[in-house]
Image (cartoon, grey):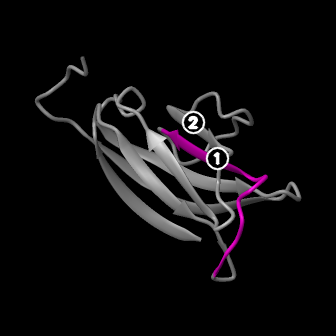
């Protein structure tokens, strides 16, 4: 499982291209679900992820194992600071695997307006 740090400017659109691989081989995401979750804490017991500050569910992955997670300006309009994220896949068999986890730094800037 990879661990990564992302830096995102607050109030901007940001895309993450996720490549699903099993044993180093690109594996189809057709019929699978990709979960992208961001929280202010690295761990909690919230089974529904209702405490997530960003929660994305992607169901349109490709047969080549590629999915794009797009965060909108509204999604990233968070208080600047460090957050924790992971990307998990629930495959067609119903098994869930955490593929990537890490930290997201939301970087503030002089601009606050998005409209």
Residue found at the far top of this picture: 115
Badge 1 crowding class, 10 Å Cα cut-off, few under 14, some 14 to 19, many 20 or more, is: some
Horizontal side of 94 relative to 27 (left or right) equals right
Place of residue 103 in the rendered image (x, y in percent of width and height, measured from the top left)? 42, 53
| Residue drawn at point x = 69 percent, y = 64 percent | 63
Q: Tell me if residue 27 comes above or below residue 60 in the rendering.
A: below
Q: Quadrant of the C terminus?
A: top left
The residue singled out by tag 2 in the image is 55
Q: In the displayed orientation, state which residue is furthest to the left.
A: 110
Image coordinates for residue 93, horizontal then vertical, percent: 89, 59
Could you say which is closer to the camera, residue 59 or residue 51?
Answer: 59
User: In the picture, which quadrant includes the N terminus?
Assistant: bottom right
Question: Is 81 included in the stretch rendered in magenta?
Answer: no
Could you say which quadrant of the image residue 110 lies in? top left
> According to the image, label 1 marks what residue?
35
Residue ID at (63%, 82%): 24
| Mark positioned earlier in the residue sequence (2 or 1) | 1
Magenta stretch in the rendered image: 25-39
> Which residue is drawn at the image coordinates 57% and 43% (left, top)?
37
View extreme (front): residue: 63
Label 2 secondary element:
strand
Say whether marks 2 and 1 touch (CB < 8 Å): yes
- Determine the main secondary structure of the stretch shown in magenta: strand
- Front-most of residues 108 and 91: 91
């Amino acid at each position: 499982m990879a661990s990564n740090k992302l830096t995102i400017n607050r109030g901007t659109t940001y895309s993450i291209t996720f490549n699903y691989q099993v044993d180093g081989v690109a594996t189809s995401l057709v019929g699978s679900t990709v979960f992208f979750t961001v929280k202010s804490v690295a761990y909690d017991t919230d089974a529904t992820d209702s405490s997530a500050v960003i929660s994305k569910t992607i169901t349109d992955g490709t047969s080549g194992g590629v999915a794009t997670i797009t965060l909108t300006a509204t999604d990233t309009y968070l208080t600047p600071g460090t957050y924790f994220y992971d990307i998990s896949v629930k495959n067609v068999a119903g098994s869930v695997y955490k593929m990537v986890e890490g930290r997201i730094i939301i970087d503030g800037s002089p601009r606050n307006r998005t409209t």
